[in-house]
Amino acid sequence: MTLPKLADWLLADLKLPGGVHGKAEPEHAWWRVMCLTGVDYFSTLGYQPGIAFLAAGVLSPVATLVLVLVTLFAALPLYQRVAKASPNGQGSIAMLERLFPEWGGKIFVLVLLGFATTDFIITMTLSAADAAAHFVHNPFAPAWLQGQMLVTILLLAALGVVFLKGFKEAIGIAVLLVAAYLLLNAIVTVRAAIEVMRHPHVVKIWESAVWAQHPNWWGVVGLCLLLFPRLALGLSGFETGVAVMPLIKGETLEQRVRNTQKLLATAALIMSVFLIATSFVTTVLIPPQEFQDGGQANGRALAYLAHAYMGNAFGSVYDISTILILAFAGASAMAGLLNLIPRYLPRFGMAPEWARASRPLVLVFMGVGFLVTTAFHANVDAQGGAYATGVLVLITSAACAVTMAVWDTRARWMYLAVALVFIYTTLMNIAERPEGLKISCMFIATILVVSFASRATRSTELRITGVKLDAAAEDIIRSAGAESVRVIPRKPKPATAEDLDRLDNMIRKVHGLPPHAKIVFLQVERTDASEFSDQLRVEGERIQNHCILSTRSPIVANSIAAFLLHVEQMTGCVPHIYFNWKEGNPVANIFRFLFLGEGDAAPLTHEVLRKAVPEIARRPIVHVS
């Protein structure tokens, strides 16, 4: 394949993203969409019991109970509120964007996107690593595929190939995978519970070990509260549940919100039951050494029980189901990345051209996935900290967004308490496992550098999506007849007829304009310069024999260029615009243009026009004196 053909293939689906308010996908029943989010959320059962034991030891069941209480009485009501505030699936990131204006909000969103990227990338690599652990420990696995690193890389590569060929989320497949996986987990859990009832002494042994940690229940609970941040992986899935809201069927937005709340509550209840049950049976039935790195239960505690108590045939069926749902969890994470990045960055003007196509992004994300897998040696436990950091930061940001949104109501104290719980959990997780923050900071730094570089390179695009003139403005432009309109830009401030007379006479004298030349004054009031694109609404007024057109826009030079192009289309005559040279440092003017939407308007307007109109004969003419 030649380079041009390769480029055409990579950019075959190049398109402008729909943005936060893009058109919704086909709608489905809420329980079917729950299965789509469940391939990520429920698949954590594959490794959560093992991670919980490594974090809390024999206290794992009690620590898991604390996790369940936080899930049901903190995370669940929190995200039900997020669902109500963002019925179109924008999620908590968009809520915070609305609360923080201008560049502060944009940078805050970029930072959160860095944490979200950490969450999704680690979901892919951790799920693939756990699927590989289930595969290599299966007694029927071929001898040449016994390396967990090799199998993890192969699974990630297969995932990349699927997306390069073109992947569409199949809710039907998700329903089958989730139904089969939950059924098999229920069978294994019930069988393990029967084993516990047959041998009650294992519970006595566990109780003795618990009391050895602390002599009373209050002390045990206190220890579990301290250990809770290490189990935060079990909180994943809520942000995804809100993000897929546009897929949920509802006659009205209120109905969609209620159905989403049903989805979140049902998923949380199902997961809570499984978390408590599986944590208990794995703790009392599996020897502690098997949970350690290299042990038969490391990253696959329930699979260990399936093989031990139901035979290798059933255990292999369980392994296949687990591998499939973990692989699909990676697919869900990749789909989330491909939807999340274009949702914000192009709207900010912070995405390179190739980032609007999915295949180049797939290659980038897969390359990052390979690096992360290699850095963590495909170890499930080692990646837990990074995954938990991404999950907790997103939940904490949601808690803070909801708290600020309801601050004027009586509910503020409840949500403030929830926010403080998650802030504590996040800080403790970062303190104990700083590698997660380090990885997130790498993603954040990359996103910031690429985003601002892209914004700089795209700054001289036209960036104006349309120009609308009111009746007075349109009458002013058309009154020029067959002559070119001469535009004089001025700062938006109150004008008197004497001021306008003086400026009019000066321009005519300097540029040798005849008395009959149609001169129009244009003033652009700068708005939020962090916005990348805008639509101009131009208003006209007359002060004696002078015509003034006024508009508001985040970028002055681009707005002037768009207005000139609109005038050329209306009149068929090339308009002229007359600037004065702007004093000051050229470098400072460039930064003023990039971040404040101002700067030296003359050369910038000419550059925007040059890029927008290749045909010189139709390009508006810029004069500078």
Image: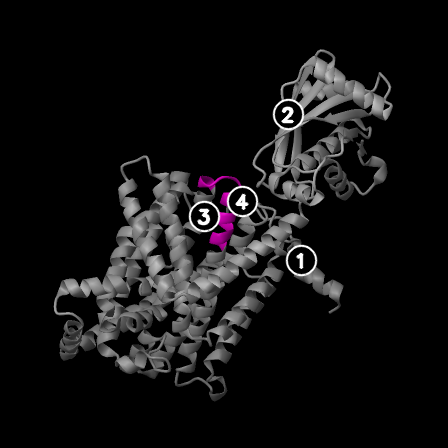
- Where's the C terminus, which quadrant? top right
Residue 182's x, y, as percent? 33, 66
Kind of residue at disc 1: Ala
Alpha-carbon span between mark 3 and mark 4:
16 Å
Give the labeled residue for mark 1.
12
Q: Residue at x 20, y 62 (%)?
A: 222
- Where's the N terminus, which quadrant? bottom right
Of labels 2 and 1, earlier in sequence is 1
Q: Give the colour scheme of this rendering.
A: one colour
Residue farthest to the top, as pictured: 544
Q: Secondary structure at mark 1?
A: loop
- Of badges 2 and 1, nearer the viewer stands 2
Give the labeled residue for mark 3.
93
Of labels 3 and 2, earlier in sequence is 3
State whether residue 517 is above or below residue 613: above
- Of badges 1 and 3, nearer the viewer stands 3
* C-beta proximity under 8 Å, tags 3 and 4: no
Q: Is residue 150 visible?
A: yes
Residue 508's x, y, as percent? 83, 21
Q: Secondary structure at mark 3?
A: helix
Kindly indicate the quadrant of the structure image that contains residue 67.
Answer: bottom left
Q: Main secondary structure of the magenta part?
A: helix
Is 139 or 452 nearer to us in this picture? Answer: 452
Is 429 or 402 nearer to us in this picture? Answer: 429
Kind of residue at disc 4: Gly
Q: Secondary structure at mark 2?
A: loop
